[in-house]
Image (cartoon, rainbow, N blue to C red):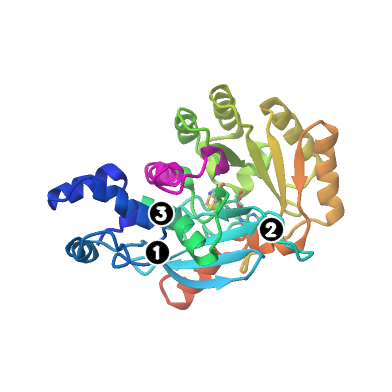
Amino acid sequence: MPALTGYDPAALEAYLASEGQPAFRAGQVLDWIWKKKAASVEAMSNLPAALREKLAAAFRLHALEHTTTQGSGDTTRKFLFKLHDGRYVESVLIPANPALYGERSDRRTLCVSSQVGCAYGCKFCASGLAGFSRNLDAAEIAGQVLMAERLSGERVDNLVFMGMGEPLANLENLLAAVSIITSPWGLHLGARHLTISTSGLVPQIRQLAEHPQQIRLAISLHGATDEVRGQIMPVNKKWGTAELFDALDYWNSRKKQHLTLEYILIEGVNDHLEQARILANHARRLKAKVNLIPYNTVEGLDWKRPSENQCRAFRDILKNAGVSATLRLEKGHDIDAACGQLRLKQETEEGIIEAPMKVR
Ligand code: SAH
Ligand code: SF4
């Protein structure tokens, strides 16, 4: 059974017309789903009872079933969702101002998954550990936002496609979800509040540069040279840094928003200060911000974050070169980036995937 959350007005009107229903019913149904956040089709009280029965028999309302939540209140919360085929994905809700001193956080960012597993196999990442299983469809991607809003009772202000999976390897479903998320009839979130993160799929970066909406782009760089990047990111063998930076120049020629370069700091792997100098040159030329992320330990992997002093020294080289660079050292954010670990644990326990055996 398809999920209603994957339908846009045209698709829903077509279905309703085939059932002899007027087109305006589509707007009513979508309003119940995305605005009133109905818990069931039965709850859609301005629809005729016969239509509600028909919809309930032909569709699931939601594509996701909430399984567990880690964290609570005004802190970072991780939601685990079960999919119709028994697989799992997770989304992470991050308050912008964690209420450390008792005040409420005022903005919330949701980190969304785009695939079950990931085919790109970056050596440091939990999402790629058990390989790739399948793409999420539009209802499963957009549904994460709807579920997070329903579960938290709060509005999501920002979306980052930085959960499990490589969003640009699932571009068609991703853009269908973006359309639902940004549409006035859907979640009506501005495209400028959406950031897609990619490990560097060059053809898709160029394709996305032509997209009419002002979506933001973040690049998982993690190495400033082919030598360093190639050691930890197999994708760099297909599209090296020169090709990647060409594609980013092209992006800049088409888009107004500044790029973000993400750079995980891993001790002894990519934290050499020479990398910071090279990174600074690239970032300056691309007018990109750099987001430095001290590595979050992943169970089963041997990588470590560098000392705080080393992280600061790395950042200072960027800053002194005139690059806008952020570095978050607090441990409290550990839950943020380590997306993929919750589903890995759940699916391993259920025997859906084998316990990944991977050492550095
Ligand atoms: N596949 C896309 C989006 C998902 S990964 C991409 O790679 O960009 C989102 C971000 O989390 C990436 O920058 C990724 O490199 C980073 N990441 C993965 N594992 C991490 C870890 N253990 N600690 C910190 N960041 C991690
Ligand atoms: Fe996939 Fe991104 Fe993880 Fe690399 S960092 S394995 S591309 S999810």
Q: Is residue 117 visible?
A: no
| Image side of residue 21 versus residue 192, left or right | left
For residue 64, the mark is: 1
Q: Residue at x 55, y 24 (%)?
A: 250
Around disc 2, counting alpha carbons within 10 Å, would you say few (fewer than 14), some (14 to 19), or many (20 or more)? some
Label 3 amino acid?
Trp
Q: How far across and how far down the image is residue 188, in percent?
A: 47, 44
Q: Is residue 244 visible?
A: yes
Q: How far across and how far down the image is residue 273, in percent?
A: 81, 42
In this figure, which residue is indicated by the disc labeled 3?
Answer: 34
CA gap, disc 1 and disc 3: 15 Å
Dot 3 falls on a residue whose secondary structure is helix
| Image side of residue 156 versus residue 261, left or right | left
Q: How far across and how far down the image is residue 76, in percent?
A: 64, 63
In this figure, which residue is indicated by the disc labeled 2?
Answer: 105
Based on the picture, tell me whether residue 153 belongs to the magenta stretch.
Answer: no
Label 2–label 3 contact, CB within 8 A: no
Establish if 124 lies above or below 284.
below
Around disc 1, counting alpha carbons within 10 Å, would you say few (fewer than 14), some (14 to 19), or many (20 or more)? many
Establish if 264 lies above or below 320.
below
Label 1 amino acid?
Leu
Based on the picture, tell me whether residue 187 belongs to the magenta stretch.
Answer: yes
